[in-house]
Image (cartoon, coloured by chain):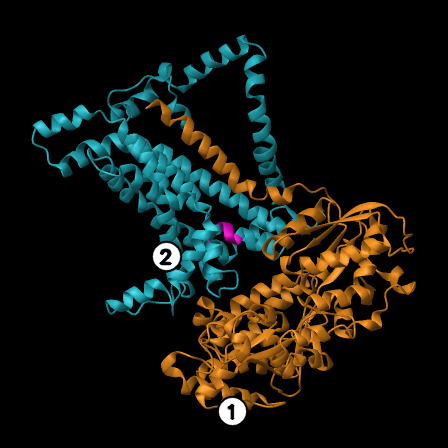
Amino acid sequence: MTSSSLRPGSPAPSLPGRAARARPGNPAHGPGGARSSGGGRIAGDGIWPWLFIAPLVTGISVFYFWPVLQTAFYSLTDWGVFGGWTFAGVDNYVALFADPSLYLSIGNTLLYTAIVLLGIPIAVYLASLLNLPGLRFASLYRVLFFLPYVAMPTAVAMVWRVIYNGDFGLLNHALALVGIDGPYWISTPGAATVAVAIVGLWSSLGFSLIVLAAGLKNIPPEMYEAAELDGASRWRQFRSITVPLLTPSIFFVTIVTVISSFQVFDLLYAILGSSNPVLPKSMSLVYFFYREGFVTNDKGYAAAIAMVIFLIIGIVTAVQFRLQKRWVQSD
Amino acid sequence: MSPLFPIPARRRTAALAGAAGLVLLVSGCSGGGAPAGSGEYTEPEADLSAEITYGVWDQNQVPAIEENIAAFNEEYPDIDVTVNVTPYAEYWTKLQTQASSDTLPDLFWMNGPNIGLYASNGQLEPITGAVESGDIDLDNYPDALVDLYNVDDVQYGVPKDFDTIGIWANKALFEQAGVPLPEGDWTWDEFQQTAADISTALADQGIYGGAGGMDGQTTYYNTIFQAGGSVIDGDTSGYDTPGAEAGIQFWTDLIESGGSPSIQQLTDTTGDQWFTSGKLAMYWGGSWFRSAITDTDLAANVTVLPLPTGEQQATVIHGVANVVPAVSENKRAAQALQVFLASQKSQQQQGDAGAVIPAFDGTQDAFTQSLPDANLQVFLDALEYAQPLPVSNNSAAWNAAETELLPQAFSGERPVTDVTAELAEQMNAALAEE
């Protein structure tokens, strides 16, 4: 994982592109050096630093790391409904990688994630609109955009289920007014995943917007003043100042959005409904996990799915951190 | 940009762990299934003192349960009962977690699809002792349901209530369509014709005569039984038999003739919603549907028709039972309540409260009186030809295959025999793993 290269203590490069190239050849300033000096400090302070982080570490160990290890173990077993297991080696993984449902659910999850990610450019644009000087009711708009994010996913899903209804839904009613015969959104394979993803996009917009708005506040107003004096248009300012200086925030919301999209379950489950015939064709990875673990009671198999989800998210996130050097500006 | 690092890192760790942390719910259990209960029973003395919990999923029934408990406490004043209501959607997930950690409620509701799973894994205390001592007499309850709670010749409970399937009909829509309301017994052909006639007559208003759906208990299990077929026969699937094929074909025909909305339409808007919106003339529904219409404008226009007869007359019957876990610190107090809830007195209280049809013979009159003009007697008469809900030790595994495959037959996308053959294959594979 390359996260340590983001350490606040490492030297701040003036040009990110050059820094990324320079760092590997300059080990004295690299993460290795920073770590050894930090380690010495903690050792010198005795037990106190450990005591201070103990509550958090204990909680995370008991509720996160230990279950991860247990899951890894159970993925190698045939695990009974009420406890009790027999060792099964890699049987679960062999069966899983031969199961077309795995690839189907990975495909659906990727499609869902891609659509939800489209919300980020929208959020950047909206955030900069909300940040325009002199905009009235800016806080009101911010609250309105944020509301879907804090609403219960199940409640959101119930409302959208009604909107998407093929015969009596608001959406198809509106489409009919302009002469379009809308599909049965939540009961047509393909359309169902897109329909759920649109709701996912809509409900994650508020979160991205708030983070990006905070990022915008960090951009010095002088930059815009200077640009204005040089005769740059609003659009030009947006492209050449707002977006580049906002890239750290954009990177952050991208990471968070990807991780949460890969774990989509509640929206899908609540919008489509558990007896929906298209569900097996539209299920996400976590729904697949839920179905095997809690519906058909194949818990060892479900543990193997959980491990695969874990690995996929880990790899995708690592790749994102590696790629960020190419496009994220840091000051 | 120093604030960037700590936040994504924390979020990332949390989310990474969160993916696996989902299984946290089920990971707290120790190895080894609990030993099966012995069925030991001695009649509890009146001064038995204990605090017990009673796990249920239906909030609507709580008032009747409170009455039961008040009467119970007249006999056993020192047994304190707490009722825990968990919504059905989470009930079984929660119960499994509780079973894994030996913290099941002292007494709890069990249903057909799950009894095999819990009984065969040694989670439940048999009622053998109470039956032998005569405190519970199995003859007082519908045979099909007593059988449902008998796993490998051991009895784990008796039904506390039952439900059968009938056709809820909207008389006003029959009149509007100019189609006569069927009287008495009728055949599959007559039903199909009636449904298609109503759909045709009222097509301009988007009203349908009948409706299929994805719920076997209220739809295709009934027609499979009526065709003389079976869903599960011993430990093999019945889906690849002519009876089951005919039972499935019934719904494919109904949709094809326009007598029912399509499967897509029924996914977006379920049969009961079509019916309560006044857009459906005949809805195949359980006796429990009564509570959904009692206080609506529809109530005055509703009557119940018996299911049509195929090769034979049949309906699905199901009911909930009270069961005691094999591991319980308050087993004797829980058994006292279990026996009391199965008694005629307690069952009469349930019936009078009107939320369900009680299972004890002769306590059902209050139910038929709750909608006096709707001919609810149909649901009681159905006891004569009722067959239990098809279940196995892990019903959910093949129920998932039904939901996945059968829509392809109903929609006409694939021939019925192809679909039922594939379903039988998948179901047999699932049954072999039990």
Q: Colour of chain B?
A: orange
Q: Nearer the viewer, residue A162 or B18?
A: A162
* Residue type marked 1: Pro
Q: Is residue B35 visible?
A: yes
Q: Nearer the viewer, residue A136 or A244?
A: A136
Dot 1: what SS?
loop
Report the side of A14 relative to B426 (left or right). left
Residue drawn at 63 percent across, 60 percent down: B60
Nearer the observer: mark 1 or 2; the answer is: 1
Label 1 neighbourhood size at 10 Å, few (<14), some (14-19), many (20+)? few
Q: Position of residue B431 (x, y in %)?
A: 67, 64
Q: Which residue is mark 2?
A: A194
Report the side of A323 relative to B37 (left or right). left
* Residue type marked 2: Val
Q: Position of residue B116 (x, y in %)?
A: 72, 61
Q: Quadrant of residue A159?
A: bottom left
Magenta part, dominant SS = helix
Q: Which residues are magenta?
A: A284-288
Q: Which part of the image, by quadrant, shows the C terminus of chain A?
A: top left
Q: In the image, is residue B153 part of the stretch drawn in magenta?
A: no
Q: In the image, is residue A285 part of the stretch drawn in magenta?
A: yes
Q: Which residue is mark 1?
A: B180
